Image (cartoon, helix red, strand yellow):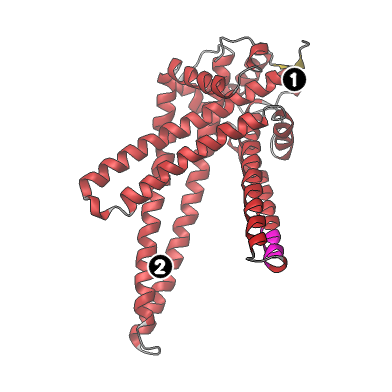
Amino acid sequence: MMDREQEEMQFLGFFGIYKESFKVIFAWRKIFSKITLSLILPLSFIYLVQMEVSSLFFRKIIHNEIELVHTRSGTPKYGKLSDLISNEWAYFWLFKAAYFTLVLIFSLLSTAAVVYTIACIYTARELTFKKVMSVVPKVWKRLMVTFLCIFVAMFFYNVGAAAVLVIWAISVGASDMGIAFFVVLLLLYFMGFLYLTIIWHLASIVSVLEEAYGLEAMVKSKNLIKGKLWVAIVIFLILNIVLGIILFAFQRLVVHGSTLGMASRVVCAIICFLLLSKTILFGLVIQTVIYFVCKSYHHENIDKSALSDHLEVYLLGEYVPLKAKDVQLEQYHV
């Protein structure tokens, strides 16, 4: 990627961004392979194991609830089944809490590792896996604050969507016109959700490479994406479709694929596991490339020496944010 002049990056479109992302991964495949093995493979494993374990929980709970329905209330068996179901739900939610915690940790660490790696490539800094891993823990707090801000934004967005849905159900309902209106609302909801997802990913990059984080990083990413929004929407939409296909295949062929036989299910699980890991890596790289494209589009010249000094701060100790004007906000004139 970084053999291009900064001014040229702004002209990259859909295919250009994909091409640059592939070039970065293949040119630095050794370091990215190590990041994948240490962070992204565990993340993918957690994703897929969660699907299998959740399915086991649900099958067991549903079986016991069906048996409870056919058991006379007030009997010892009814009491035992009722307690068993309550315990199973408690274990299920504890498992989900552990799952979300691990996914959040590995997601933030993977993001920090990939963004820092690409920034080092950009500034031609000496890059080793050991250096990358020493830096990763020092930026997770900033990424966590940014994640919490986007989580709150997503929460209120979904609350608003639910309120609109209630109003639709009361005022229009399931008439022909109402169904058509519901489809329009659904499309608008998914477009808005995708937009917030893009803001989140760009805000994560900003949190690592700039002094802004949290709400400030979200505002910064919102401004950065202007002019390249539709390109980003198409790219992230395709990535999400690919992820959905992989997870759907795992659900059908592995989780609910008892008719395939154990050997076939294991092979399918390994294929889905590897494809998911590659897709996550590519997604992290491409969102960083989009960041540099947006910076170029807005004529924000990234000072390589200043950015290099900024990255050096991570290695010297606790993170001390540099001022935006020192890090990367110097404007160039076309």
- Residue matched to label 1: 329
| Segment colored magenta | 162-169
For the point 50% across and 33% down, the residue is 110
Pick whichever, 166 or 70, lies toward us. Answer: 166
Count of labels in the image: 2
- Position of residue 230 relative to residue 165, above or below, is above
Judged left or right of residue 65, residue 270 is left
- Position of residue 168 relative to residue 289, above or below, is below
Pick whichever, 161 or 44, lies toward us. Answer: 161
Judged left or right of residue 291, residue 125 is left
Q: Where residue 69 is drawn, which disc sits there?
A: none
- Residue matched to label 2: 88
Residue sticking out furthest to the front: 176
For the point 65% across and 34% down, the residue is 203
What is the crowding at mark 2: few (fewer than 14 residues within 10 Å), some, or many (at least 20)?
some
- Position of residue 321 relative to residue 330, above or below, is below
Q: Earlier in the sequence, mark 2 or mark 1?
A: 2
Dot 2: element? helix
Could you give the CA–CA distance between mark 2 and mark 1, rounded to whole angstroms? Answer: 53 Å
As shown in the figure, which amino acid type bears the numbered disc 1? Leu
Do the numbered discs 2 and 1 sit on residues whose CB atoms are within 8 Å? no
Dot 1: element? loop
As shown in the figure, which amino acid type bears the numbered disc 2? Glu
Give the dominant element type of the magenta stretch: helix, strand or loop.
helix
| Quarter of the view holding residue 9 | top right
- Residue 156 appears in the figure: yes
